C-alpha cells in the first residue's frame, strides 16, 4: 500500500536533506507517537555515550511503535530529533542515522540540541507524527 503522505519541496528554498513540508489527504488517520527512546527490553539505556547507536535504537523503537499502529516509516509526516548536546557534531551523528533510516522518504524534520533527556544516560529521542489513509468501510 502506498503512503498517504505527500512530501513538499520548493526550488525557491535552500537545498536541504529533508522535505520542507508534508501533507496527508482529508480523512487520513493521524498517529501521534511518543518520543522513541534508546531503551533496551530490560529498560536500560542503549550504548551510553554513543549518539549514533542511540539514534539507531530510537529508530528501531519508532519502527515498532509505527507497526503497532498499522503504519511504517513511509507513513511518517514529520519528525523532531532531540539530542542532549550543545555540539553540532553530536547532533549530526544522530541525524545521519535517522536520515539514513528514512532514505528517500525524507520527511520534514527538526533537529534540536537539548540540555537533558528523561532517562539516565539518554542522548537521543525521536518524536514523530504519521498519517495513514482511512480504510473505506
Image (cartoon, rainbow, N blue to C red):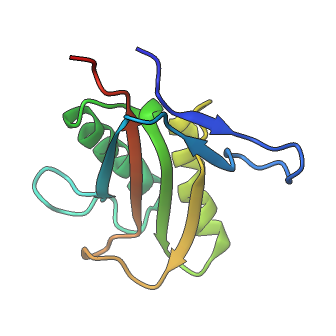
Which residue is drawn at the image coordinates 48% and 33% (left, top)?
Answer: 25
Q: Report the front residue among 50 and 123.
A: 123
Residue 73: x %, y % from top left: 42, 34
Which residue is drawn at the image coordinates 41% and 64% (left, top)?
Answer: 124
Which residue is drawn at the image coordinates 55% and 71% (left, top)?
Answer: 112
Residue 102: x %, y % from top left: 53, 37
- Measured along the vertical axis of the image, is residue 20 above or below residue 64? below
Quarter of the image for the N terminus: give it. top left
Which residue is drawn at the image coordinates 27% and 76% (left, top)?
Answer: 118
Residue at the extreme bottom: 115
The answer to whether residue 137 is left or right of residue 19 is left
- Measured along the vertical axis of the image, is residue 106 above or below residue 115? above
The answer to whether residue 65 is left or right of residue 27 is left
The answer to whether residue 6 is left or right of residue 54 is right
Q: Report the front residue among 80 and 92.
A: 80
The answer to whether residue 42 is left or right of residue 30 is left
- Measured along the vertical axis of the image, is residue 13 above or below residue 44? above
Residue 52: x %, y % from top left: 49, 54
Residue at the extreme right: 12
- Measured along the vertical axis of the image, is residue 84 above or below residue 109? below
Q: Quadrant of residue 127?
A: bottom left
Q: Report the front residue among 41 and 117.
A: 117
Amino acid at each position: 500500500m502506498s503512503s498517504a503522505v505527500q512530501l513538499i519541496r520548493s526550488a525557491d528554498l535552500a537545498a536541504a536533506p529533508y522535505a520542507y513540508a508534508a501533507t496527508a489527504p482529508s480523512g487520513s488517520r493521524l498517529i501521534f507517537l511518543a518520543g522513541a527512546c534508546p531503551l533496551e527490553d530490560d529498560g536500560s539505556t542503549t550504548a551510553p555515550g554513543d549518539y549514533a547507536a542511540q539514534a539507531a535504537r530510537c529508530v528501531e523503537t519508532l519502527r515498532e511503535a509505527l507497526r503497532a499502529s498499522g503504519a511504517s516509516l513511509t507513513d511518517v509526516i514529520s519528525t523532531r530529533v532531540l539530542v542532549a548536546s550543545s555540539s553540532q557534531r553530536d547532533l549530526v551523528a544522530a541525524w545521519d542515522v535517522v536520515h539514513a533510516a528514512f532514505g528517500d522518504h525524507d520527511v520534514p524534520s527538526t533537529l534540536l540540541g537539548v540540555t537533558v533527556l528523561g532517562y539516565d544516560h539518554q542522548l537521543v529521542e525521536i518524536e514523530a507524527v504519521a498519517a495513514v489513509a482511512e480504510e473505506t468501510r
